[in-house]
Amino acid sequence: MVTGINYWLIVTCWEVGRFPFPYEGTVMYSLFTLFVFRQTFKYGIIFSSIVVTGFALIVLIYPIYGVQNGINLGFVFIGSLVGLMGVHQVEGALKKLSTANITLETLSQIDHLTQIYNRRTYESRFTEQLFLNKRTGNSICVFIIDLDYFKDYNDGFGHVQGDEVIKIQAKYLTQLFRREADIVARYGGEEFVVVTSQVAHEQCIEFSNGIINQWSSAKIKHGKGKAGPHVTCSIGFYFEEVTKDTNQTKMVTKADKALYQAKEKGRNCFVEYKS
């Protein structure tokens, strides 16, 4: 529409007053449309082709610029080309910026060592899950998992090997909790937290046994300090049928108390919190 008005103005000025409306106006309107309306490079090519073709038809039909018709047409063509180059560069820069923003957003949500959710993301996702489950009345189970005698392992085998054990625990958990709604996160240090919803109480027990058995099968050497011969973990979990009174902090606190009880029992086991 802007380009059409510009062409109407050129023709009207010539027909009414024999006034050669400057070709710069066409270049200006072209650039205005390309950048202010944020045209993509694809549609910019189509638009610029229309601009140049329309101007070429005008100077062929009307001797508006006399001997400078061809020169002015060349300037309009070059102006459109320059505009297209600018659109291409801006579009490329915006795509890179968008990709960078997505990458940064992902990095802010993920624990760099284990590539699972970090604590901040876990808390946010847990809040969302609890809100959804309060509306539907489903169950939620919170697990807190802690590697047994991990400080002794670090002291005996080094922090690099300790990091490998932490990554193995993260891998085991993501193998067990594979649903999109499952929240698996590093809680801090060698502690992990899992939140799963729409599960039966029996499934929570199965999950706990599954985590214990994963380490039992792995048989990764430990034996440092008070630890047994292999790496193990302790688990505390709390299961609740969600109501409007269900509280996120209280659920985590109860799972944490159950974990403490598992450690009191001698570790390498799981305990369910009972009111």
Image (cartoon, rainbow, N blue to C red):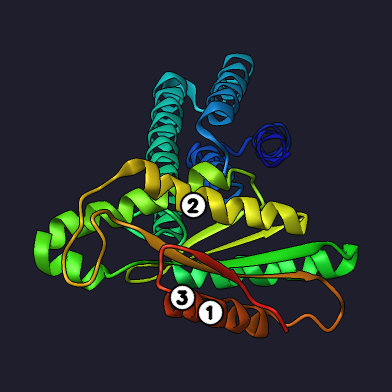
* Dot 2 amino acid type: Ile
Is residue 231 found left or right of 198 in the rendered image?
Answer: left
Q: Which residue is mark 2?
A: 211
| Image location of residue 226, percent across then percent down | 22, 72
Instruction: Give the position of the N terminus as an image quadrant.
Output: top right
Tag on residue 46?
none
Front-most of 207 and 121? 207
Query: In terms of secondary structure, where does tag 1 sit?
Result: helix
Front-most of 139 and 262? 262
| Image location of residue 145, percent across then percent down | 46, 65
Can you say whether 64 is above or below 123 in the image?
above
Distance from the alpha carbon under mark 3 to that under mark 2: 17 Å
Can you say whether 213 is above or below 244 in the image?
above
**Crowding at mark 2 (Cα within 10 Å: few <14, some 14-19, many 20+):** many
Residue 274 lies in quadrant: bottom right
* Dot 1 amino acid type: Asp
Distance from the alpha carbon under mark 3 to that under mark 1: 14 Å
- Residue shown at the point (75%, 59%) measured from the top left: 201
Query: In terms of secondary structure, where does tag 3 sit?
Result: loop
Q: So how many labels did they put on this image?
A: 3
Tag on residue 256?
1
**Crowding at mark 3 (Cα within 10 Å: few <14, some 14-19, many 20+):** few
- Residue shown at the point (60%, 52%) measured from the top left: 207
Between marks 3 and 1 in the image, the one whose residue lies nearer the viewer: 3
Mark earlier in primary sequence (2, 1): 2
- Residue shown at the point (60%, 39%) measured from the top left: 19
Front-most of 34 and 151? 151
Q: Which residue is mark 3?
A: 265
Instruction: Give the position of the C terminus as an image quadrant.
Output: bottom right
Is residue 63 found left or right of 134 in the rendered image?
Answer: left
* Dot 3 amino acid type: Lys
| Image location of residue 64, percent across then percent down | 56, 27
